Each structure stands twice: as structure tokens, then as C-alpha cells.
Image: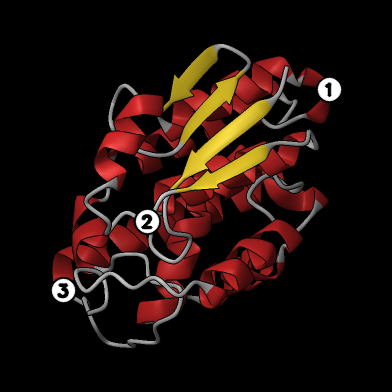
Amino acid sequence: MEFTLYIGNKNYSSWSFRGWLAMRMTGAPFREVLFHLGDPASREKIRAVSPGGRVPALHHGELGIWDSLAIAEYLAETFPGRNLWPRDRAAHATARSMAAEMHSSFQNLRKNMPMNLRRSSPGVGHLPEVLDEVAHIARAWKGARTRFGAGGPYLFGAWSLADCFYAPVVGRLRTYAPPLEADAQAYVDAVWAQPDVRAWVEAALAEPMKEPAYDL
């Protein structure tokens, strides 16, 4: 059965970024369909493939999965040999907790530091409540790296779905440059250099579409 992943603009759509990275982790071929989120005509097109009216949405044959976390879980179950989550039980539980928290939390960061991979806006969005969330994320990264990260440069050593979920945060931190401790900056640098992340970013930089609402 063919996989088709529906996504939004690569420069702005953090949720699409997560779903795309998860799909790339499987090693399976997939068709990519990109919607320009600023085009009013895209709204109905997205609703035709995603009941929630949002991207990403993954179609696997006749099955449709929407929401980035649901897509990640489906792919982990479909490709168990690819170890999308860490294999160790404690690491697996921690990774899922971190991905779920990223999925549902950090509203101040999302609002005041929207993903825009083409911009360099150091100092923008540095509100106390945003910096508190950045500090919380950095502590979680440090905890995972300290306990589980001995095997590589990522949160749980090897690249995992947890890293996929924080890759858009890494993009935000590079755009808005809040202060980071050395260990958090080292993780940011490692994620930014990861091959699939680089492929997404390079495509984002080449996009002609612009969204005034995100171009702070």
C-alpha cells in the first residue's frame, strides 16, 4: 500500500515537519503533497484528506491518519524493526512523555516564536513566560541526555521520534536565539545537522510562498 503524506509550507508548518521526519525514519517511500496554507482554496482541499482540517495527514492505502502524534505512533507500530521509539522500556516511556508534552504544551513559545526557518530574529519573543518554557524544555533535554543519551548526540542516543518532535523547537531557537546553556546548544547543533532535518530546511529555504502572519 502506498503512503501519501499531506503537509503544509515547510518554512512554517511545525506539525508537518514532525510528521515528515517520522515518515523519513521508516525508510519507506512515500508521496508528498504540499498545501500552501495561505491560499484560501487550500482549506477545502485539506478537509478532503484530513477530517480535522489540518496537516499533516497520512494516508496508507485507504486508511487516513491525522495528527502528528497519531501518525508517529502508527508508523512506530507499522515499522517495529526501525526502532522509531527507543527500545529500552524506561527510555521509551520517557521519550513518549516528552513527545506528548511537546504536542500539547508550550503555548507561549508557539505564540511568540512561530516557526520561520528563513528568518533570523534574535531577541524577538523573549518574554518571561516564553523563556520559562524554553528553560523547561532545556531541562527535559538535559535529563534525557544524562540518563539515556550515552549512545549518540540525540535525546536518547540514537535519533528517535522524540527528536522529531523537538526539531521544530530547534528551528525556533535558532531563529529567535534565546539564551541556552552549552549542553542545550550542543543538542540544537546536533539536530540541525541531522540529514533529514537538513533536507527539510533546505526545501523550506527554497519555498517561494510567504505568510505575513508568520513573518514577524
Q: Amino acid at mark 1?
A: Gly
Residue at 63% from the left image edge and 27% from the top image edge? 92
- Which sits earlier in the primary sequence, circle 2 or circle 1? 2
Mark closer to the observer (3, 1): 1
- Which sits earlier in the primary sequence, circle 3 or circle 1? 1
Residue at 45% from the left image edge and 75% from the top image edge? 208
**How many circles with numbers are drawn on the protein?**
3
Badge 3, how many Cα within 10 Å: few under 14, some, many 20+? few
- Residue 80: image quadrant is top right
Q: Amino acid at mark 2?
A: His
Q: In the structure shown, which secondary structural element does the residue marked by tag 3 occupy?
A: loop
Farthest residue toward the top? 62
Residue where numbered disc 2 is placed: 36
Residue 127 horizontal/vertical position (percent): 16, 73
Badge 2, how many Cα within 10 Å: few under 14, some, many 20+? some
Instruction: Specify the quadrant that holds the N terminus.
Output: top right
Left or right side of 70 for 87 = right
Residue 212 horizontal/vertical position (percent): 22, 74
Q: Amino acid at mark 3?
A: Leu
Left or right side of 108 for 179 = right
Residue where numbered disc 3 is placed: 127
Residue 195 horizontal/vertical position (percent): 75, 62
Residue where numbered disc 1 is placed: 81
Q: CA distance from mark 3 to mark 2?
A: 30 Å
Marks 3 and 1: CB-CB under 8 Å?
no
Farthest residue toward the left? 128
Task: Specify whether residue 165 is in view.
Answer: no
